[in-house]
Image: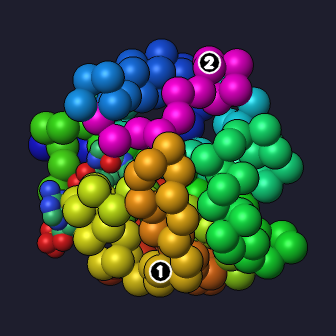
Amino acid sequence: MVISVGTATGSDLDGIMALQEANQPARGGYLSVSLSRTCIAERMAAMPMVVARQDDAVCGFLMTSTLEMNRDVPVIRAMLEAYAGAADAYVYGPVCVREDARGLGLARTMFIELQRHLPGREGILFIRRDNPASLRAHEKMGMKEVAGFVFDGRECAVFSYVAADLQGCADGENAPLGTQV
Ligand SMILES: CC(C)(COP(=O)(O)OP(=O)(O)OC[C@H]1O[C@@H](n2cnc3c(N)ncnc32)[C@H](O)[C@@H]1OP(=O)(O)O)[C@@H](O)C(=O)NCCC(=O)NCCS
């Protein structure tokens, strides 16, 4: 399977929306929010958003957003009450990989790509404790659990990391733009 990883553009919006929809709790998925197309487009314009594409079809996405953008998102507010992070921290997620592309290291590759855009800044995320694949995947990326909270009766872990400075890296694990998996 040849998959490339790079920055999301407007032509990825339909694919991102479809993948987000397929991973909602009502369909047995683990995503905690369902963002509108407008909201995703706003995030894409304001902050780095990474996608994985197979033959131009989106098979993974990794979004980020500013703390300010999440002012009215209850689950993110709960996360930030449990752990505030640095003043210039940003929110990592949601992240999602199409079911048939999981376990190939795509989430990790998208994270490496993301760090190229935000070197030195702290990212904060939460993961439901009943989502072992995501907990394990993010622990393997080197993220550290810093707090926990309960939202809607679900236990969540808060993770934090400071993006490595990968500027100029062009080989090995620190893969460049347009990486092929
Ligand atoms: C969580 C998710 C993004 C991981 O994406 P991925 O591309 O499959 O992850 P990776 O291939 O980079 O995984 C890296 C590590 O995570 C762990 N992992 C991945 N899938 C796993 C699973 N099903 N069970 C346990 N561990 C798992 C493994 O340790 C793996 O490393 P290894 O292959 O060297 O053992 C993906 O499973 C997904 O989209 N899930 C549905 C949506 C979701 O839960 N999003 C996250 C919300 S917080």
Q: Tag 1's secondary structure?
A: strand
Against 34, residue 85 (above or below) is below
Task: Name the residue type under label 2.
Answer: Arg
Left or right relative to 10: residue 33: left
Left or right of 13: which side holds 41? right
- Residue under the point 77% across and 53% down: 66
Query: How far apart in space, not on screen, are marks 2 and 1 (Cα)?
Result: 31 Å
**What's the magenta bit mostly, secondary-structure-wise?**
loop
Q: Quadrant of residue 165?
A: bottom right
> Is residue 181 visible from the viewing direction of this image?
no
78 within the magenta span: no
Figure quadrant of residue 27: top left
Residue 37: tell me if it is visible: yes
- The numbered disc on residue 80 is none
**Left or right side of 38 for 17:** left
**Relative image position of residue 104 (x, y in whole percent):** 17, 57
Q: Which residues are magenta?
A: 29-40
Q: Is residue 171 above or below residue 90?
A: below
| Colouring convention used in this rendered image of the protein | rainbow
Q: Earlier in the sequence, mark 2 or mark 1?
A: 2
Q: Which residue is mark 1?
A: 145
As shown in the figure, which amino acid type bears the numbered disc 1? Glu
The residue lying at 32 percent from left, 67 percent from top is 135
Label 2: element kind: helix
Q: Which residue is mark 2?
A: 37
